[in-house]
Amino acid sequence: MSIKSKELTLISPDGRRLDGRRPDEIRELKIKAGILENADGSAYVEQGNTKIYAAVYGPREVHPRHLALPNRAVIRCRYHMTPFSVEERKSPAPTRREIELSKVIREALTPAIIVEQFPSSAIDVFIEVINADGSTRCASIIAASVALASAGIPMKDLVAACSVGKINGVLVLDVTDVEDKYGEVDMPFAMMPNRNEITLLQLDGILGPEEIEKAISMAAKACKEIYEKQKSALKERYIELRKTVEEGFRT
Amino acid sequence: MDLLSSGRRVDGRGLEDLRPVEIRCRSVKNAEGSAEVRLGKTLAIAGVKTSIGTPFADTPDMGVMIVNAEFLPIASPTFEPGPPDENAIELARVIDRGLRRAEMIDLKQLCIVPGKAVWEVWIDIHALNHDGNLMDASALAAVAAILTAEVPKAMVNEKGEVTINKSERQRLPIKSIPITVTMAKIGDKLVVDPNLDEEEVADAFLTATFVDDKVCAIQKRGERGLTAEETMKALQIARQKAHELLKTVREVVGGG
Amino acid sequence: MPIYVKDWDLVVPGEVLAEGDYVAGPYVYKEGNKLFATTIGIVESRRGVIRVVPLQGPYIPKVGDVVIGIVVDYLPTAYLLDINSFYKAILQATEVLPPQKNALAEDLSKYLDIGEAVVCKVMRFDKYSDVVVSCKGKELGKVTEGRLIKVSPAKIPRLIGRKGSMINLIKKETGCKIVIGQNGFIWIKGKDPASEALAEKVIRKIDQEAHISGLTQRIQLMLQLERRS
């Protein structure tokens, strides 16, 4: 039986997906900033069952020295999946997919970082996928942006990300693993929400130009929602403490 | 930049002009298929080799297609010997997605004995001279090599054993011809088919693979962003260019 | 001319702070008509200039800064210091050695060992090369006795306070000598460990609560309570 003929109702007649979501709904998103002590910045993201840690070290010295750029920081990114993050154990060695994703994620984040601030330095972003359930590169970008900001690295904007899929001809947001495997399209998307600049756009699947336009607009709207969550996660620690202190002072 | 505002590029091209395209097929005798593509001074060569192998567990009735790319040190002073780097890997995977989603090769027809024996099609792309836009040159080379490949016939005897008859050749089963076009954003201008100098100053790139007027693969590259409007405009221009390139391919390959 | 934030508001990168004729101060950039924050921090708006005071971030050296560096390596005639920044600092051995000694012939570790700390001043710095520091001067030199603690460099201005008001309060109430490095290292030397511990506790509280207004009153209260007990 080939993949295409597998009997699986990814979307019901009344528009509900396998997990009950409507086409334009993203999964529940939990973001925690600054959870790793040693890193300069860090974040943990849970988007449905996709769970990701991101850590940022930098700006720091570039080793080997000759890789340093004289007038800006070098951004390095490593996207890696733990062997137990997927159903069939994955070897810890970097795969071609991880290498490509490391590059596209780096290119999704770099537009937001004010690299001229730290010449001859490196800013390292490490992403570990602990559990993969679709849209891992988007969740990685969500986590990495928060990690960069929590390190105090100056940025023009955060980067929010969301994927678009197509099931039975219907465009859907934030695809799960099953929806990616058995659906028709996977379109990972990331943007700087306050600048309206797209920093990640890939398409694997067939879409007409109007569909692409619609998919971009759906994803952009979701990214603005996601930005609010990233914002809250960053402010959370400080705001909680502020409340405690102000209340404590009043009593 | 001033030059661009007047609609001209340093090499004299208009913003939407491709460099001269040259496609030469079947020059490698030992390969089942091959094509050399020149896009201006950029030169890429693709080879197609076939072999019998086992299918993937979840697609027992489909052949296997593998795309690999190498940026050879001979192509540029900046390429070092060694395994493919992230750029070569990205290029191979983008071209693979374009071919696969367009279903250029009908993998179902490459099944010999379901679950046991299928044709494996190996597409290896090598950059020979890098003067910008290796992506489109490589994609074109892959497509031309596949279109003109002549693969042996496989036969199954009563015992279920598979033999290859090298003297009887046939074309690969083709369902479509995907065409890849890359646009570069320089400042606020969009240019088609960037050469090396343009690649070095470009803010971002948008590569799109077209099949029957629809898009089957997109890859944004580069360290800057693009607005939604720039993206849609880039896709629109790229689509027109894909038409032109498809005509060229058909002329060279003849039919298909 | 709309301004979307007020003083003491907590902002994150990309947040639109205002639109119109405002001037972008530190950690703010202007594009078109809009002003955006570039870091997680507190908004401060004065006379048409909007700036963000960061709550996090690396130490970026400035000429004239007093910094405390820790020796990490020896160069032929200088010491290499870690100044809690990705830039390392270079301290010429001649500043530490007695005048008649020849730096090339001497064993540099005799005068300053790896792991020891020195209070210095930034003499030269540009983004493209290492920092050059000097320890010749009043209140500069090797750190002896007491304790060295590290706080986020972004909080140092708050720790010092307006015209030194905050740090002077702490010094007075704890009786400690406190040397503040702009790079986040702080040297506390007190009459006894207890007063040093109190100074450290107060400093850490400031590190934690720098973003909450009313800090001065809270610190004053804290010191009063400690004095009574």
Image: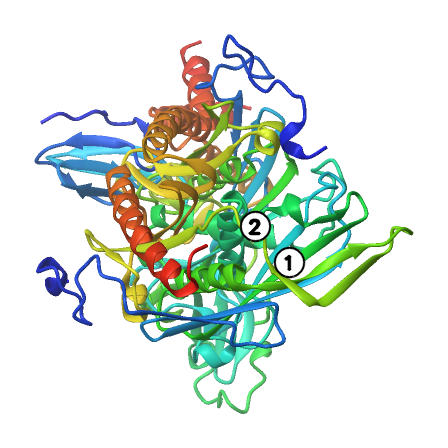
Circle 1/circle 2 CB separation < 8 Å: yes
Q: Is residue A12 left or right of residue A148?
A: right
Q: Nearer the viewer, residue C82 or A210?
A: A210
- Disc 1 and disc 2: Cα gap in Å? 9 Å
Q: Nearer the viewer, residue C193 or B55?
A: B55
What element does badge 1 sit on? strand
Q: Is residue B115 left or right of residue B74?
A: right
Q: Nearer the viewer, residue A109 or B75?
A: B75
Q: How many marks?
A: 2
Q: Tell me which residue sits at (39%, 25%) in the image.
A: A222
* Quarter of the image where one finds residue C166: top left
Q: Tell me which residue sits at (22%, 43%) in the image.
A: C29
Q: Is residue A175 left or right of residue B188?
A: right
Residue A77 position, x and y percent, is 51, 53
* Quarter of the image where one finds residue C100: bottom left
Q: What residue is disc 2 on? A: B105
Quadrant placement of the N terminus of chain A: top right
Q: Is residue B131 above or below residue C48?
A: below
Tag 1 subunit: B
Residue B100 position, x and y percent, is 55, 47
Which colouring convention does the figure follow?
A: rainbow
Q: Is residue A160 above or below residue C88?
A: above
Q: Of all residues shown, which one is farthest toward the right?
A: B159
What element does badge 2 sit on? loop
- Mark 2 belongs to which amino acid? Ile
- Mark 1 belongs to which amino acid? Val
The image's mark for residue B94 is none
Q: What residue is disc 1 on? A: B121
* Quarter of the image where one finds residue C140: bottom left
Q: Tell me which residue sits at (58%, 27%) in the image.
A: A179
Tag 2 subunit: B
